[in-house]
Image: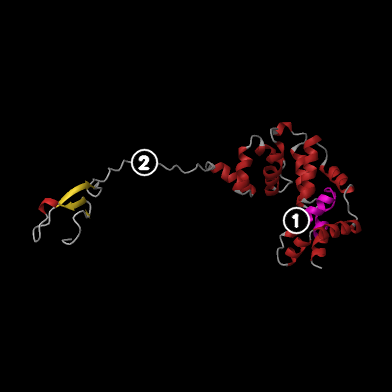
Amino acid sequence: VLNDPPETRYQFTRLGYFWRDPDLLQPGGPLVFNRIAQLKNTWSKPEPEARPQPARVVVPPAGPPDLCKADRAWLTQHGIPEAAGRPLLGAPGARAFFEATMPAASAPATASWIVNQLLPAMKDRSFGDLPFSARTFEKLVNLVATGQASAHQGRTVLAAMLRGGGDPEKLLAARKASMLDDVAVLRTMVADVVAAYPDKVSAYRAGKQGLLGFFVGQVMKAARGSAPPRTVRQLVAEQLDQ
């Protein structure tokens, strides 16, 4: 520092910029520095006081209300799972409609059809507005439960019943009469669909077994829903496994 040019500036940490006092600059004399620029000293500033944050109250989403003891006993008596029982107990008129189908129909199957098929299809209707009785609905459930109708056929018959009532057995017979059940024709349709999707055929044969449903859907679309789903599924599986 003694040998630096007189105009040299120096920075002292956190204090500022200094230079040697030219009036007191003498050989062997003391070093006297004058501050020519001050630095902002942020180190000595107190930390800003943290503002208190409002307390957050997390309210868990409300679950479904607990069933009363009598409702639980009623569901247990009929062998109905609680997931199906809640909508059945909650929809106006659904419980009375269900009980009117008893005792011939299978209780769990009937409950499932009311909750999963009938209630969504009713939309804004009430049970009193339905063009069929609970006993007629019971016949439809039994047709599906006994294997006389597939689930798909049952839904088709239900849609027809909602449009204008009718006997489920007669509606099912008319549906079957219009079905495309010529196996030779169905095989040709299956072959055409399989040939149209070679990449998906390769993926299926490589292990993506879930694509079977895709091919069945394409065949049913080509048949405009008039082909028996079980037969189509069997023919598609045979074609893909070749």
Of 134 and 205, the residue lying toward us: 205
- State which quarter of the image contains the N terminus: bottom left
Looking at the picture, the colour scheme in use is secondary structure
Label 2, residues with CA under 10 Å away: few <14, some 14-19, many ≥20: few
Residue 230 is covered by the magenta coloring: yes
Of 27 and 202, the residue lying toward us: 27
Name the residue at 84% across, 58% down: 190
- Which SS does the magenta portion mostly show? helix
Type of amino acid under label 2: Ala
Q: Which residue is mark 1?
A: 214
Q: Is residue 148 visible?
A: no
Type of amino acid under label 1: Phe
Could you tell me which secondary element the residue under label 2 belongs to?
loop
Residue reaching furthest left?
29
First in sequence, mark 1 or 2: give its number: 2
Measured as percent of width and height from the top left, residue 205 is found at 75, 66
Of 178 and 51, the residue lying toward us: 51
Measured as percent of width and height from the top left, residue 40 is found at 25, 46
Q: Which mark is residue 55?
A: 2
Q: Which residues are magenta?
A: 213-233
Of 19 and 100, the residue lying toward us: 19
Q: Quadrant of residue 111?
A: top right
Q: Is residue 78 left or right of residue 175?
A: left
Measured as percent of width and height from the top left, residue 159 is found at 78, 40
